[in-house]
Amino acid sequence: MAAIEEGRARFRIDTEGPVAGIGIMILTTAAFAASDSTVKVIGATVPLLVLLWVRYLFQMIVLGTWMVRLRDFGVFRTGSAKLQVLRALLLLTNSACTFAGLRHLPLPVTTSLAMLAPLISTMLAATLLKDDVPRSKWAMVVLGFIGMLLVVRPGGSAFSWTVIFPIAAATTFACFQVVSSHLSRTEDAVTTNFLTALVATIVLCLLVWMDQAETLPALGRVSFGSWVLVVLMATMATLGQSLMLQALRRTPLSVLTPFGYAQLAFAAFFSWAVFGQVPDKWMAIGMAVIAVSGIGTVLLHGRSMQAEPVIAKD
């Protein structure tokens, strides 16, 4: 009997340890890739403002309802209102740039360029914050730039000025990460996610109201099937945010971040499965180079911060 129990314990899945956190992180990237794929499918038929509005309204309702059911009304309080608003505006801008990029560019291109955020963070730290950035990190920046050139290939037939959208998304996300780091020291992650969705929803309600002369007629032309996909997109995005929180509960961010590049693989898969588009040789190499440079930047950052506590971000 003891041998049987020992055998069961050996093969029991640990749902609370770091390995589980890594698995949940990979599921997170799959959810985000699925959300982006859905945006690309309906991006031409549903107004951009409506896509963003439903995405953040859905997240606000889900998180708010969850916390009310748990009777945790502290989620509605914050001691850093200005930073919470700034974070929400940065993430909203990031989403708008990503959605706009998905309308014009292949899914793997948009995803891979958005993954330049760690490299842009390094450049911002050196230029704006005057941080002392070692040569190894600059080498990763140069490597990431080479990867970007391989993906977009300026001067080629497939090159388009619309690559500015995912690059802008990566830039705003880099700034978003800086603000999130500051907030994570004093604010609860669920509170931050809820307030981000709340602020973004309020801003989008105002924008939809201001643009109602064009938005309302466009809504009348949206099919029922497209509305189903809009709800699916919002569900996948909210699921990704929830999974991210669960992953961070189990594993430090410094360990999880490199696995975030699994989104590149899922983007390539959905591009093939949904749109019949397969990245060519140079695009695949460029995506791999960007992933290596991003992971290298994260690992170098972790090594330089070994003496400091891990700061969790949502």
Image (tube, rainbow, N blue to C red):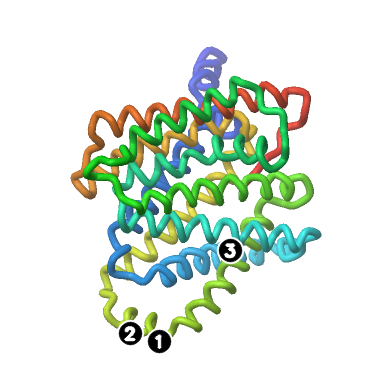
Q: Look at label 2 and name its amino acid.
A: Pro
Label 2: few (<14), some or many (≥20) within 10 Å? few
Label 3: few (<14), some or many (≥20) within 10 Å? many
Q: Position of residue 52 (x, y in %)?
A: 46, 66
Q: Which mark's residue is nearer the viewer, 3 or 1? A: 1
Q: Earlier in the sequence, mark 3 or mark 2?
A: 3
- In the rendered structure, the answer to whether residue 85 lies left or right of residue 24 reads right
Q: Earlier in the sequence, mark 3 or mark 1?
A: 3
Q: Do callouts 2 and 1 mark residues in contact (Cβ within 8 Å)?
A: yes
Q: Which mark's residue is nearer the viewer, 3 or 2? A: 2
Query: As rendered, which of 195 and 65 lies closer to the eye?
Result: 195
Query: As rendered, which of 113 and 233 lies closer to the eye?
Result: 113
Label 1: few (<14), some or many (≥20) within 10 Å? few
Can you identify the residue that label 3 sits on? 197
Q: Do callouts 3 and 1 mark residues in contact (Cβ within 8 Å)?
A: no
Q: Look at label 3 and name its amino acid.
A: Ala
Q: Do callouts 3 and 2 mark residues in contact (Cβ within 8 Å)?
A: no
Task: State the residue lying farthest toward the top.
Answer: 3
Q: Position of residue 15 (x, y in %)?
A: 55, 34
Q: Position of residue 123 (x, y in %)?
A: 60, 37
Q: Secondary structure at mark 2?
A: helix
Can you identify the residue that label 2 sits on? 217
Residue 184, compared with residue 306, is above or below; it is below
Q: Say which residue appears at 53% left-offset and 51% top-offset.
A: 241
Can you identify the residue that label 1 sits on? 213
Q: Say which residue appears at 31% left-offset and 50% top-offset.
A: 160
User: CA separation, marks 3 and 2?
Assistant: 26 Å
Task: State the residue lying farthest toward the front.
Answer: 155
User: CA separation, marks 2 and 1?
Assistant: 7 Å
